[in-house]
Image: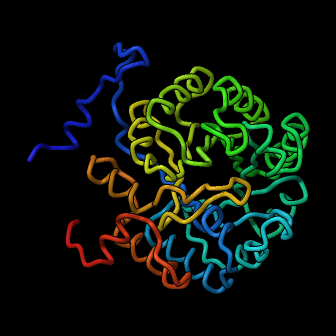
Amino acid sequence: MPDLSKMVRESEIRRNEQGEVSSVNVWPRKVQIVEVGPRDGLQNEAEVVPTDVKVAWIDRLSEAGLQRIEVTSFVNPRWIPALADADEVMRRIRRADGIQYSALVPNVKGLERAVAVGVNAVAVFMSASETHNRKNINKSIAETYPVLEETVREAKAAGCFVRGYVSTAFGCPFEGAVPVARVREVALHLLEMGIDELSVGDTIGVATPADVHRVVDVLLKDMPVRRLALHFHDTYGMAIANICAALEHGVQIYDASLGGLGGCPYAPGATGNVATEDVLYLMRGCGIETGVSIEAAVEAAGFIEDHLGRPLPAHNLRARRGACTTT
């Protein structure tokens, strides 16, 4: 059987839109997984998950070796009722040394709530699509910038690590295709605010590898690859292929959600995030280090699946719970 890891590392050529050789790339030897299941995964659930279950689940994520966990969101509970217990969850989880426990904050008020319960890593968010931004934040893109500028400034003053999300970077449920120039414009504004990391999201899961090459090529002209993260949804089954495309650029940070949980309450038709355990399976097969136990991750996915009372879409979860012996 061929050595897949060796084949991947020797696969250094990709082609541009005209089919010509455009660059030479080597996949990274190590990546970071940002587990967004407790926030992005649970925010769209019709039934509110009890706080006790959330806390027990997040503790399992820590034990699995995940170094970055997005725990909750300090938005107005009227917007996201599923995460109304954000303060209590952050107080009750067991925080292990060396793990970043972060939260989403929409503005300074949300930031103040987060800092009050010991959060030192936060994320601000906006969309590359005007319509989605208005539906998600109730503001235009232009109106959102000053709100986030103030939030980032106050977060940095409080000593927080700050991530910036750009949603609908590959397509919008209301406007369709989103120009790459628009994505770059929003990204540059966030970087100029002083964020530490930029997460670019395929909110409705329409991207293909060609789209990933096109967007990442543009973004990496303005920022170092170590500060870029990608956030893929798996609506059309392209998330893993899109991660492979991003690996060719050396991207080392990927958002994922155990079990494939997720969606966006303001993006009709959007399905779950790429499943953490499927990303781990890809990385292990390609010889790329993550520091996360796929076995423990699958167990944690099974834990939340049992409490939700419905099967989750992650391939590895389905295969392993179906008594598949492949490892």
**Nearer to me, 286 or 136:** 136
State the count of labels. Answer: 0
Quadrant position of residue 133: top right
x, y (%) of residue 148? 84, 43
**Left or right placement of residue 181 versus residue 323 in this view:** right
x, y (%) of residue 147? 89, 44
The image shows residue 1, relative to residue 77, as above or below, that is above
**Left or right placement of residue 216 versus residue 292 in this view:** right
Where the C terminus falls, by quadrant? bottom left
The image shows residue 314, relative to residue 137, as above or below, that is below
Which residue corresponds to the image point at 67% horizontal and 60% vertical from the top-left?
Answer: 102
Visual colour scheme:
rainbow
x, y (%) of residue 306? 49, 84
The image shows residue 271, relative to residue 238, as above or below, that is below
Seen as rendered, the residue at the extreme left is: 1
Which residue corresponds to the image point at 39% horizontal and 72% vertical from the top-left?
Answer: 298
**Nearer to me, 299 or 167:** 167
**Left or right placement of residue 107 versus residue 5 in this view:** right
Which residue corresponds to the image point at 54% horizontal and 51% vertical from the top-left?
Answer: 233
**Nearer to me, 31 or 260:** 260
x, y (%) of residue 318? 36, 71
